[in-house]
Amino acid sequence: MAKSRSQNKKSSGESTTTVNTAYFLNGTQNPVTLKIFIGDKGQSGDSVISLDNVIIGKNLKGDIEMMVGTNQELAGKVLDITTTVLDLSRETNKTEVTVSLTGGIAEREYFLNEEVKNEGDLVPYSMIFRFKKINK
């Protein structure tokens, strides 16, 4: 399975906290897996995950790995994720989230980051994936 990594960093060097894109499916019964990794030292976070406006995960703490459905079940649906990261590090004010989807046509991974002004600040990350079936 091919893997694609998107940095999502703007050309001006600014950080980004959003992803809004399509994820392509093959129409099989293969499971699609979501992974969320809250990165950089001294960070914690929680996530809310909805599929077609129905919450499938609420107040999920830390890193997450979950099956969201099969290729066939997910076609035409929208996965909406909000992950809020709390910067607790005394060494840096960088926050990071890496999100990946596997099981469709190709693995997709996105790296998001934001530097906060003060230790203890929160950063909301928003990730929206529209599932689309590709006919072969």
Image: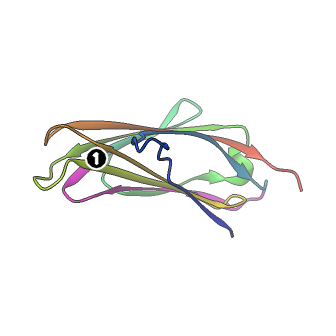
Residue at (74, 43) in percent of width and height:
132
Instruction: Estimate the x, y position of residue 39 in percent, counting from the top left.
Output: 32, 57
Position in image of residue 90 (x %, y %): 10, 52
Q: Secondary structure at mark 1?
A: strand
Q: Is residue 115 left or right of residue 130?
A: left
Taking the spot 89% from the left edge, 56% from the top edge, the residue there is 136
Foreground residue, 114 or 75? 114
Question: Label 1: which residue?
Answer: 45
Q: Is residue 45 visible?
A: yes
Answer yes or no: is residue 59 visible: no
**What residue is at 19 percent from the left and 37 percent from the top?**
117
Q: Which residues are magenta?
A: 28-44
Residue located farthest toward the front when viewing the structure as drawn: 12
**Image coords of residue 40 (percent x, y):** 27, 58
Which residue shows up at 33% across the image and 43% down it? 114
Q: Determine the image quadrant of residue 5.
A: bottom right
